[in-house]
Amino acid sequence: MAPAAIEGSSGTRCLKDNISDIKAQVAANHRGAQLIASLYNDYGRDVVNFYMEEVQGAAELAVRNLLKEVHQKFAGNSLEATDHMDDGTPIRLRVTIDAGSGDAAFDFSGTGPEAYGNWNAPIAITHSAIIFALRCFVTHDIPLNQGCIRPIRVVVPDACLLKPGAEAACCAGNVLTSQRIVDVIFRAFAASAASQGCMNNLTFGIDNDPQRGFGYYETICGGSGAGPWGDGTSGVHTNMTNTRITDPEILERRYPVILRRFCIREGSGGRGEYRGGDGIVRDIEFSVPMKVSILSERRVVAPYGLHGGEDGERGQNLWIKANGRVLNLGGKNTASVGKGDRVVIQSPGGGGWGSPASRKVDASKKDGCSREFVSVGNGSVDIIAGMGQSA
């Protein structure tokens, strides 16, 4: 049955906003087409097409050269890694590189079946995660484009978590499963320890009153994984997301909530020669009854450390009732909270890199993760340096 045919439900939360979004996308496409046409008029179709192809060709060459270096560093062996979603579903990857051409096969055979839940990921998400990871690995400036994935052949079995059937729910595939795909790729390439591995999607609102009803949605930061370059970073978004949090003053002015606490979750990053970044604690009190939903990962399977580094701390989502009773919401849940109730999100820390025994005393001002942003080679993950260290 169509959602709108069920009493009390709708196919959309706000149809007016959806239509406006679609109109904006159509307008952006029209504007893009006009600008391309303008380039054609100014320089000619052949010249513009030549440069467009060259931009993609430069990206392709950079990725091929990278993969040839990786093949040499791994002595011609395949790169393999496995990680798991919190429900136990494995995501397996085997990367085979052709030393001559720089072609590579990313084979996800052995990945678990589609989930009885909403974290299935359509095949496009796997392609996006691969492009993202490869762009991170290339340490010099190239624009992100289709050329990055030209050398790659992607193998994903039918009816698995990463290639579900048409009826599978996929809402969280983009915000959760994509993160795990990136972590698996980073692990296979020995690039860095795992980051927090999710977006900690929190929503709350009132849906039974047309006049007073509202909905609020935020994503919450956590710790990034450490690598051969140094400590991870605390309280940041990682990998497939980059959204900003709402200012406390705006949050409390517009919605019937009180932000009780928003701070670094000290010590949640994995120990190592370089420590993983710490997660955060976000404590929200509700001034009126409403519904709250949380969609998160890394509440069961910890963010892995690499080369002797320890795992980062798992996340936790708590519902603290006004009477003091504390309930664990788990990774994915919906609750009807009352006035004075609180939801406390403790986001995961990143994994550590290298043995904790190798950590220098002055590696940071205190025995925790550096809070400064670490700039690394155009923001890239220097996997060649990492593999050189681990060899």
Image (spheres, helix red, strand yellow):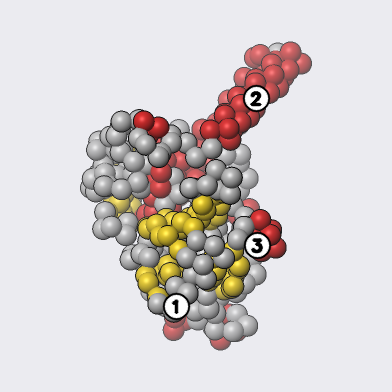
Residue 333 lies in quadrant: bottom left
Q: Is residue 316 above or below residue 218?
A: below
Identify the amino acid type marked 1.
Asn
Q: Secondary structure at mark 3?
A: helix
Residue drawn 68% across and 23% down?
31
Q: Secondary structure at mark 2?
A: helix
Mark 1 or mark 2: name the one nearer the start of the chain: 2
Residue lying at the far bottom in this picture: please name it.
361
Residue 374 lies in quadrant: bottom right
Residue drawn 35% across and 48% down?
119
Residue 260 drawn at (x, y percent): 59, 73
Task: Name the residue nearer the viewer: 265 or 311.
Answer: 265
Identify the amino acid type marked 2.
Ala
Q: Which quarter shows the N terminus?
A: top left
Residue 366 drawn at (x, y percent): 59, 84
Identify the mark at residue 8; answer none if there is no mark.
Answer: none
Task: Name the residue nearer the viewer: 126 or 209.
Answer: 209
Numbered disc in front, either 2 or 3: 3
Q: Is residue 41 above or below residue 365?
A: above
Residue 215 drawn at (x, y percent): 54, 49
**Residue at label 2?**
27
Residue 184 drawn at (x, y percent): 37, 54
Q: Which quarter shows the C terminus?
A: bottom left
Would you say the residues marked 3 and 1 are in contact, meaning their CB atoms lie under 8 Å apart? no
